[in-house]
Image (cartoon, rainbow, N blue to C red):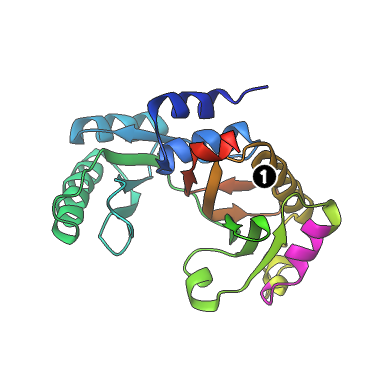
């Protein structure tokens, strides 16, 4: 069965998916995401913040802004309309200062979530082996520690469990100094779902879900990006 989100994106000629679109695809892949809405103006950001419920997070939405945090394009824990409005103005100004001439679509608005352990699931295509699924500790830790594991797609349940257990930060997932352990079965299920989805959709060239907040009771994706290559569907 065709994927309605990918069908629509293909008709629009979309290749680089920012957070809002990438999360739409993830939802159809069976991954729980933090609901994220696009605001194209200050007033719309305030309205959407009230709709979702405070506190909220705002992030710049632009294919030209490669590093949102470094560009001042992320504002956390906004507790009310005034803070959201000020954050919207600040994000746009800061992003344009860092990336002059950037095409900015607006900002994404989502509820502030936290707790649990931040993990990352990614995917790239190796010229020799094809799609490679990645798992590791998320947030800024992935850039600092590069503590990740890889497997060729499609993966088995055993592969998924090995990916999780072989990273050096695995003790953090088991519960460390009083923190609750992550539900590993949930992580395995998400890895399998994404592996199957990627295997069925060769147009997915790259995927980066970071962070996913993993807890004892569930896992939710807080941010994501995706690159599509529609020529791959013809191969």
Q: What residue is drawn where x is 56% and y is 40%? A: 232
Q: Nearer the viewer, residue 34 or 27?
A: 27
Spot occupied by residue 82 in the image (x, y as percentages of width and height): 20, 42
Q: Name the side, left or right, on which 68 lies relative to 229.
A: left
Q: Name the side, left or right, on which 26 lies relative to 158.
A: left
Q: Examine the rendering and report whether any part of residue 121 can be seen.
A: no
Element class at badge 1 = helix
Give the labeled residue for mark 1: 194
Name which quarter of the figure residue 125 lies in: bottom right
Spot occupied by residue 78 in the image (x, y as percentages of width and height): 32, 48
Say if the magenta span includes residue 165. yes
Q: Magenta residues?
A: 159-169
Spot occupied by residue 91 in the image (x, y as percentages of width and height): 22, 51
Location of residue 54 with respect to 119 vertically, above or below: above
In the picture, which quadrant includes the C terminus? Answer: top right
Q: Nearer the viewer, residue 2 or 96?
A: 2
Say if the magenta span includes residue 119. no
Name which quarter of the figure residue 109 lies in: top left
Q: What residue is drawn where x is 76% and y is 52%? A: 188
Dominant SS of magenta comes to helix
Q: What residue is drawn where x is 29% and y is 45%? A: 62
Crowding near the residue tagged with mark 1, few <14, some 14–19, many ≥20 C-alpha atoms within 10 Å: many
Q: Name the side, left or right, on which 5 lies relative to 59.
A: right
Spot occupied by residue 70 in the image (x, y as percentages of width and height): 29, 64
């Amino acid at each position: 069965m065709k994927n309605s989100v990918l069908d629509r994106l293909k008709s629009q000629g979309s290749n680089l998916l920012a957070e809002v679109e990438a999360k739409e695809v993830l939802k159809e892949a069976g991954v729980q995401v933090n609901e994220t809405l696009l605001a194209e103006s200050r007033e719309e950001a305030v309205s959407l913040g009230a709709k979702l419920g405070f506190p909220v997070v705002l992030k710049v939405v632009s294919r030209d802004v490669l590093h949102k945090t470094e560009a001042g394009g992320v504002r956390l824990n906004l507790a009310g309309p005034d803070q959201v409005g000020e954050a919207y103005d600040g994000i746009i100004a800061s992003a344009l200062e860092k990336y002059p001439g950037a095409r900015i679509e607006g900002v994404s608005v989502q509820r502030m979530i936290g707790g649990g352990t931040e993990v990352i699931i990614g995917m790239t295509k190796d010229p020799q082996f094809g799609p490679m699924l990645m798992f590791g500790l998320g947030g800024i830790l992935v850039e600092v520690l590069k503590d990740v594991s890889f497997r060729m797609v499609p993966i088995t349940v055993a592969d998924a469990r090995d990916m999780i257990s072989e990273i050096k930060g695995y003790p953090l997932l088991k519960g460390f100094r009083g923190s609750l352990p992550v539900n590993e079965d949930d992580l395995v299920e998400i890895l399998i779902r994404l592996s199957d989805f990627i295997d069925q959709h060769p147009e997915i060239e790259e995927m980066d879900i970071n962070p996913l907040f993993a807890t004892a009771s569930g896992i939710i994706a807080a941010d994501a990006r995706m690159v599509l290559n529609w020529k791959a569907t013809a191969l």
